[in-house]
């Protein structure tokens, strides 16, 4: 039976970083909405969701993982987080080994706060570090002090929390040396998991404008590829094996759920859910989300994933992981062996047991490979 | 696309003729056959619209802009491709007349259609934009009309425009055709002003047809169009005698006999008649399915009382440019063949034969009257038959003589013989360019770079100049017109006619991707331009070919000598950074889009080349930015 997971979106930040296009807001109050009571809306949605699932005959399944993302979830007080968790537990119950991750900023993740979260049952902290180079942090408009990261990680370990660091490479003006120092510093801190993302300049962001007017140089894909390789070498050498395009170390079970098309409900404004072959997503703006919740579910769109689309999604997602995808899926998709073979010959794909997976050389070309497998 | 005209206050558009004359019973004295000669954009179709309204055959409610232009492409591009003949009732001094208006295309590619229309008329309205004056194309058609002995009625259109200078251009027209500037009528197709005076003038000036009503029937086919419901509809001008419905008719060239299933006039929808009499213009339907069986220029007579001497036909249009048309998806080849077969039913000037390209697979080498014709045909193939196509860069027809005196006709640069060559001859044209005098210098520069030789230069009026040049067709076929337009800020106009073949110092430039020759990119250029051409095409392809997983060297070569080189660097990564809950739908939509994009890519060896690269690679930079020619 499929596992069941929950994502909770906390749409608030102290400050919007220049590269960010996420669904997040910096005001404490938006219209009739207040950050300090917004958890109540989330709880309303949680209660309603459980009722809907019960009425639709969806089998009762305790949550395997729970992920607080944002925004900056650590802007919520421990009390707010605790109330949301209590609501989820009473509505859905938790698996005994549930993984509960909370994204935090080095600024807001104090040892006291972490202690409070650990006490409420949080098991994993994902820290948005991005870089240890103050110049790069300035380009990204991150306001935290990189010196704080070490003490936070130590405190978390002492509390028995698992930790993960988020890093970003490829910011304008980031040198190869700067990136190398960042990854070396990151592994020296003894975290069990690192996510490293190449910076994507999203249209409409301040960063995009800065690059357009020439205030910052363009990003460089070729250099990013080298940075990926540098990171991979350092992480692997320090006991953090690669397991997904942007992830190393002990796999996050929550993210694994996304990549294996498990069922999850995403709570909060703009959050996406995937249940029984349907994807749906909530109204994006927190205020409309809150208003809609008064008398209905705040769903903005639904799509039904048919069998073929599901197979294509699986290929698209599972090929990103070190496990790869069962060959049987490729057979069902009608991908001929003669289409796969050239990739094996050139060394970007490998067949391991029943699965087809990318090689180290193929990791950076997953999208291209998927497109070619589906169209050649 | 369809626009409704607002009723205008300036002129009453009530029909003057109370009853239309019945076809087949109309006396030749009451007939007037005329055409309108005009440059693109000088308002011919709008004037025709007003005539339809004013004579009452289209009421205001049914009126839409460019009523007579039937194909979508015609209306979108504002050009007329197929000529039409419309019968208009009109009354002057209490006498009723039937006027046949034969609409003509105004683009240089379709000159041969104009000459056909002219031969069906006794008079021509020379329509000139009162703000722009006469253009090269109009001048060429005017000369054609004068050679055909037509009565010319000079008319200045668009007098409602603030920029109109009717006095100035009336003077210019008077200089060209004789007579006084006052003879020049002033009309506005937009408001309808002067249109009824024009119709009066046509009745007064255009001679009535003078056929022999009692002689055996002779009708000239001046157009033949394919209609998917009715088969071939043939437009005819009766010269002598008469044709009647249900009669057995005979094509004089082939002696083929058909039954005349339907005969009638267009007014402006088909009106079935008992027959057509000498001097009349109308259509006939015999049930044939291929326009080539009801051939333009042929003479129609009756089987029972056949004429002995055929009317003088028309010169068959000769394809001037050739291009390879290939389906992107090789499995569409049979569909492409079927589509071409269908298009040929309505376009006798389209020629094609199968060809194979190492790079592009199976396709057809197609001959066109000009670049616009090529564009229209490829657009129709894609739009009406839902095909994704690659058109290779257009080429002219070369005559090549080898060392051993073997002769080759080369319509495809990749077929250019490899061995020793004695002489290469290329087609030459005589071009007429009209322009305001300020641009003479730039035009001369342009013609110079295109290997042109000036024949003469003449002032048409105070500030307008006619330049005549001898130019290799290959130099003007691709983007000369665009260049002329952009260098003269749209004022320059061009017409050209074939002028035989001349030897040229020509070489074949090949293009190699990853060291492999790509035949579809080969071109034949003048030796002095080969280096520049090679540099241009390699740097263009560098822009056009997306980065692949491997490096793609691009080389231009003459024989085995590399003359230019670029390289598309290998892409280093192609993967989405993050892919979590909400990213999945977005990522999948992107994948769908990429799948669509890949359909517009052609695999050349291992290299993905975008569909449009085959033409864009050879175009000048200015083309993409300049306004697309109408």
Image: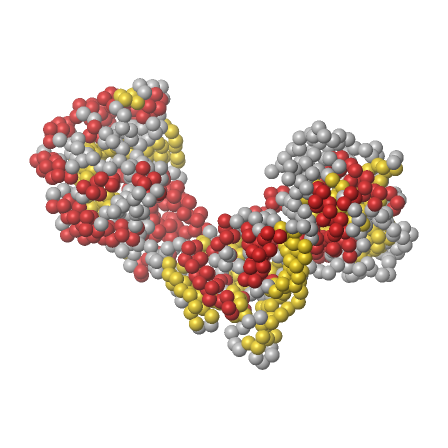
Residue B6 spot, x, y in % from top left = 66, 30
In the current view of this chain or complex, which residue is farthest to the left? A158
Viewer-closest of A372 and B13: B13
Q: Residue at x 68, y 55 (%)?
A: B459
Q: For this view, does B262 lie left or right of residue A219?
A: right
| Image point (29%, 29%), residue name | A25
- Which image quarter holds the N terminus of chain A? top left
Along the line of sight, the residue nearer the viewer: A130 or B496: B496
Q: Quadrant of the C terminus of chain A?
A: bottom left
Q: Quadrant of residue B5?
A: top right
A211 left or right of B295 in image? left
Residue B162: give x, y in percent of width and height.
Answer: 64, 37
Q: Residue at x 83, y 46 (%)?
A: B206
Could you say where residue A369 lies in the image, as x and y percent from the top left?
34, 52
Q: Position of residue B15 (x, y in %)?
A: 79, 33
Number of numbered markers = 0
Horizontal arrangement in the rendering, residue A262 relative to residue B483 (left or right)? left
In this rendered view, identify the residue nearer to me: A276 or A183: A183
Residue drawn at point x = 31 percent, y = 40 percent: A207
């Amino acid at each position: 039976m499929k596992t069941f997971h929950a994502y909770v979106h906390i749409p608030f930040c102290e400050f919007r970083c220049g590269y960010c296009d996420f669904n997040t807001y910096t005001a404490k109050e938006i219209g009739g909405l207040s950050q300090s009571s917004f958890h109540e809306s989330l709880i309303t949605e949680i209660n309603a969701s459980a009722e809907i699932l019960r009425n639709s005959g969806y089998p009762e399944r305790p949550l395997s993982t729970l992920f607080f993302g944002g925004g900056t979830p650590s802007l919520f007080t421990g009390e707010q987080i605790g109330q949301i968790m209590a609501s989820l537990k009473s509505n859905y119950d938790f698996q005994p080994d549930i993984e509960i991750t909370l994204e935090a900023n080095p600024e807001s993740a104090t040892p006291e706060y972490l202690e409070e979260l650990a006490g409420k049952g949080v098991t994993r902290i994902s820290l948005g570090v991005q870089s240890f180079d103050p110049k790069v942090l300035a380009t990204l408009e991150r306001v935290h002090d990189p010196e704080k990261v070490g003490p936070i990680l130590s405190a978390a370990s002492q509390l028995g929390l698992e930790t993960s660091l988020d890093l970003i490479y490829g910011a304008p003006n980031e040198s190869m040396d700067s990136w190398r120092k960042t990854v070396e510093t990151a592994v020296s801190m003894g975290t069990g998991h690192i996510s490293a993302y190449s910076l994507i300049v999203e249209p409409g962001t301040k960063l995009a404008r800065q690059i357009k007017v020439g205030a910052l140089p363009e990003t460089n894909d070729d250099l990013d590829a080298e940075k990926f390789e540098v990171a991979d070498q350092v992480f692997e050498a320090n006991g953090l094996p690669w397991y997904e395009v942007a992830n190393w170390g002990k796999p996050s079970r929550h993210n694994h759920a996304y990549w294996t098309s498990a069922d999850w409900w995403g709570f909060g404004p703009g959050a996406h859910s995937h249940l029984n072959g349907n994807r749906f997503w909530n109204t994006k703006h927190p205020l409309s989300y809150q208003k809609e919740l008064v008398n209905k579910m705040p769903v903005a769109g639904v799509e039904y994933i048919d069998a073929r689309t599901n197979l294509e999604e699986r290929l698209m997602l599972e090929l990103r992981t070190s496990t790869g995808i069962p060959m049987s899926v490729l057979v069902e998709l009608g991908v001929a062996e003669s289409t796969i073979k050239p990739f094996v010959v050139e060394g970007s794909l490998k067949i391991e047991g029943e699965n087809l997976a990318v090689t180290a050389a193929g990791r950076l070309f997953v999208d291209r490979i998927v497109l070619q497998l589906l169209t050649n | 696309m369809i626009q409704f005209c607002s009723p205008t206050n300036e002129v009453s558009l009530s029909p003057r003729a109370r009853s239309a004359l019945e076809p087949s019973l109309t006396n030749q004295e009451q007939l007037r056959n005329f055409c309108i000669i005009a440059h693109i954009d000088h308002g011919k179709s709008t004037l025709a619209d007003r005539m339809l309204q004013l004579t009452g055959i289209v009421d205001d409610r049914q009126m839409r802009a460019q009523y007579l232009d039937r194909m979508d492409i015609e209306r979108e591009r504002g050009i007329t491709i197929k000529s039409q003949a419309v019968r208009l009732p009109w009354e002057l001094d209490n006498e009723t007349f039937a006027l046949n208006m034969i609409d003509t295309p105004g683009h240089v590619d379709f000159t041969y259609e104009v000459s056909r229309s002219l031969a069906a008329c006794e008079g021509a309205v020379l329509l000139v934009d009162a703000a722009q004056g006469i253009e090269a194309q109009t001048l060429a058609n005017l000369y054609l009309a004068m050679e055909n002995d037509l009565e010319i009625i000079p008319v200045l259109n668009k007098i409602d425009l603030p920029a109109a200078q009717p006095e100035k251009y009336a003077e210019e027209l008077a200089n060209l055709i004789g007579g006084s500037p006052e003879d020049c009528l002033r009309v506005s197709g937009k408001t309808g002003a002067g249109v009824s005076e024009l119709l009066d003038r046509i009745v007064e000036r255009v001679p009535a047809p003078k056929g022999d009503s009692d002689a055996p029937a002779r009708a000239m086919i001046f157009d033949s169009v394919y209609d998917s419901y009715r088969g071939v509809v043939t437009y005819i001008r009766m010269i002598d005698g008469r044709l009647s419905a249900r009669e057995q008719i005979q094509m004089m060239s082939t002696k083929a006999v058909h039954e005349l299933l339907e005969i009638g006039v267009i007014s402006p929808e088909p009106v079935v008649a008992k027959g057509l009499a000498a001097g009349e213009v109308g259509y006939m339907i015999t049930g044939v399915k291929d326009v080539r069986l009801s051939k333009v220029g042929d003479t129609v007579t009756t089987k029972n009382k056949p004429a002995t001497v055929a009317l003088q036909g028309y010169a068959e249009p000769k394809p001037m440019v050739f291009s390879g048309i290939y389906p992107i998806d090789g499995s569409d080849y049979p569909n492409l063949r079927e589509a071409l077969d269908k298009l040929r039913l309505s376009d006798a000037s389209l020629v094609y034969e199968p060809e194979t390209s190492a790079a592009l697979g199976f396709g057809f080498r197609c001959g066109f009257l000009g670049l616009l014709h090529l564009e229209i045909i490829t657009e129709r193939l894609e739009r009406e038959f839902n095909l994704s196509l690659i058109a290779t860069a257009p080429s002219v027809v070369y005559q090549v003589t080898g060392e051993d005196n073997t002769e080759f006709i080369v319509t495809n640069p990749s077929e250019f013989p490899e061995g020793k060559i004695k002489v290469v001859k290329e087609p030459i044209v005589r071009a007429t360019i009209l322009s305001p005098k300020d641009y003479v210098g730039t035009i001369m520069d342009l013609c110079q770079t295109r290997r042109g030789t000036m024949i003469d230069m003449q002032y048409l009026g105070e500030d307008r100049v006619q330049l005549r040049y001898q130019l290799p067709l290959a130099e003007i076929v691709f983007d000369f017109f665009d260049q002329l337009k952009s260098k003269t800020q749209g004022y320059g106009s061009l017409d050209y006619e074939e002028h035989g073949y001349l030897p040229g110092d020509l070489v074949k430039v090949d293009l190699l991707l990853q060291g492999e020759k790509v035949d579809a990119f080969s071109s034949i250029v003048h030796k002095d331009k080969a280096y520049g051409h090679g540099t241009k095409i390699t740097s263009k392809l560098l822009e056009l070919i997306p980065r692949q997983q491997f490096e793609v060297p691009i080389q231009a070569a003459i024989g085995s000598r590399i003359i230019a080189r670029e390289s598309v660097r290998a892409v280093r990564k192609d993967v989405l950074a993050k892919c979590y809950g909400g990213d999945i739908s977005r990522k999948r939509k992107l994948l769908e889009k990429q799948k669509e994009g890949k359909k517009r890519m052609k695999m050349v060896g291992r290299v993905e080349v975008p569909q449009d690269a085959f033409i864009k690679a050879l175009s000048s930079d200015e083309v993409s930015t300049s306004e697309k020619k109408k």
